[in-house]
Image: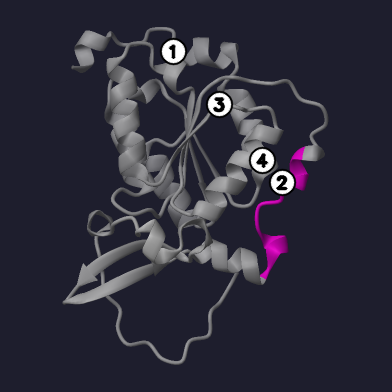
Amino acid sequence: MVGFHVHTVVGIDRISWTSIRKPDNIIYGGAEGVATGIAEFDDRLITILDFEKIIAEIAPQTGIQVSDIEKLGRRKRSDVPILIAEDSMLLSKMIVESLNKAGYVNIIKTDNGQEAYEFLEEAKCEGDLLSHCACLISDIEMPQMDGHHLTKMVKDDPVLKRLPVILFSSLINEEMRLKGQEVGADAQISKPEIASLVHLLDTFTTPDWQSTNNANPPSQAASR
């Protein structure tokens, strides 16, 4: 558990994820910045901090360790397309580096659930979904659309529901795990367990798993 000591609390407000926007890369420092979103609230501009980047800088040993992939030994190269929805630029970069080292070289990055869903909608219309995306890895808290909402929309779609969804977040606790199950996530794992994430990908992208879970895929016409 990680705690932040603050001088005072000026208020606690509820802001919808749809009201939060991606920060401008130039103004907020891009990959080097500490903001993952901005929102207007009561004539104020609210900056959403990159919690995981701050933690990684304070205590690097608690973050994703690319070196853990080396312990998996020699691995084969895989070209299966993996879609990632992650708002933290630092975490996104580290996840991609780790998966590349594990042999997964076809990674599509998106910054939030909305971008990921738009990509999947385009992929669905082009025909064979799994040739465009074989697995979705999503954070939970993200601007515009969070991971739970994204998962529900994927699993409620007659075509997209074939896609395995892994929730990969530092927020996985008993309550969040139950919510993830309710929306249909195929697996949930806590950051920074990157080696466990690779093992899940190995399972969900095998031909045997794909054929078993997609024996009778719905027609594309039915989804339009």
Mark 2 lies on residue: 66
The extreme front residue here reads 26
Q: Earlier in the sequence, mark 4 or mark 3?
A: 4
**Residue 57 found in image quarter:** bottom right
**Label 3 amino acid?**
Asn
Mark 1 lies on residue: 214
Q: Earlier in the sequence, mark 1 or mark 3?
A: 3
The image shows residue 132, relative to residue 2, as above or below, that is above
Q: Earlier in the sequence, mark 2 or mark 3?
A: 2
Residue drawn where x is 31% and y is 14% of the image: 126
Mark 3 lies on residue: 106
The image shows residue 50, relative to residue 112, as above or below, that is below
Magenta segment, which residues?
A: 59-69
Question: Mark 2 to mark 1: distance in Å?
Answer: 32 Å
Mark 4 lies on residue: 98
Question: Mark 1 to mark 3: distance in Å?
Answer: 21 Å
Other-residue count near label 2 (Cα within 10 Å), few / some / many at <14 / 14–19 / ≥20: some
Percent across and percent down for residue 109 are 46, 38
Question: Mark 4 to mark 1: distance in Å?
Answer: 28 Å
**Label 4 amino acid?**
Ser
Tell me the quarter of the image containing the N terminus.
bottom right
Other-residue count near label 4 (Cα within 10 Å), few / some / many at <14 / 14–19 / ≥20: many
The image shows residue 72, relative to residue 13, as above or below, that is above
Discs 2, 4 touching: Cβ within 8 Å:
yes
Q: Is residue 128 magenta?
A: no
Q: Is residue 167 left or right of residue 100?
A: left
